Amino acid sequence: MSIEQNGQCKDIVNVNEMVLIQSIILSKKLTISAYTKKDIEIHPKIKKCKFVPDLNSMNLQVSLLKGLVILQGFIKGKLICDGSIIDTITLPFQHELICEEVCPGDEYKTTPPILEGVLEPQFIYEERGCGIIILKAIFSLQLTVIREKIGKVSVTILGDINEDRCNNEHFKVNSPVCEKNHIEYVEPECCDCHEKKPKSLLGKYMSYD
């Protein structure tokens, strides 16, 4: 089979090309729990409390080991009781995922976290208005582990966009030639005058004062 290119018939060539591809080793949705318990001073008459996490404050680190993926970090949020902000609390988390195909040299990508839910704060009261508060937030994200590999694909070569790319004549550089104006001295018409007058290239005489 042939195609017409630049007024000439070109044969279609089928070849196998080497390409660099990104192979997906792992792609999975993960559900992660951030949890903490903290000593806090709180009045027993407080009626309602809630924890509001800030997803923009999340700090996430992913470690790829041999056959193991570890996600760890923290997320911050406000503890609000009866409409007032009591404290800013940090919830740490750590999640482990076993995958035999994962290696330390692989790359990973994660989607932005999605808040799945927040448990109602749990208080354990002690004497003199002190106690322990237990907080837990659940969020999810998609984790994808990628590895670069070399592959081979079958492609059809229709032709080169620039058939003259190897013609050196197209790459010659013409350097501009600069000619200097020379002053030519000629003998005057008067034989008794020994003064020489300069003459330009245009044939005009120049006089000196």
Image (cartoon, grey):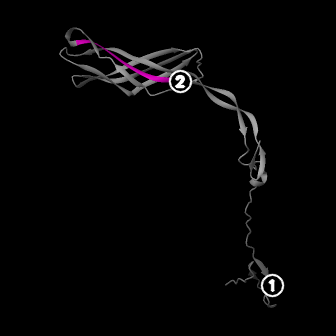
Would you name the residue on which mark 2 appears?
144
In primary-sequence order, the first of circles 1 and 2 is 2
Q: Say which quarter of the image contains residue 180.
A: bottom right
Question: In terms of depth relative to the viewer, which is nearer, 151 or 199?
Answer: 151
Would you name the residue on which mark 1 appears?
187
Q: Say which quarter of the image contains residue 82.
A: top left
Whether residue 94 sits left or right of residue 204 in the image: it is: left
x then y, percent, for residue 68: 54, 15
Whether residue 26 sits left or right of residue 59 in the image: it is: right
Looking at the rendered image, the disc whose residue lies closer to the viewer, 1 or 2, is: 2
Q: Does 164 appear above or below 198?
A: above
What is the three-letter code of the residue carrying label 1? Glu
Rate crowding at label 2 as few (under 14), some (14 to 19) or many (20 or more) other CA atoms within 10 Å: some
Q: Residue 134 in magenta?
A: yes
In this picture, which residue range is highlighted in magenta?
130-143
Residue drawn at x 45%, y 23% is: 141
Whether residue 208 sits left or right of residue 87 in the image: it is: right
Q: Secondary structure at mark 1?
A: loop
The CA distance from mark 1 to mark 2 is 93 Å
Residue drawn at x 77%, y 78% is: 184
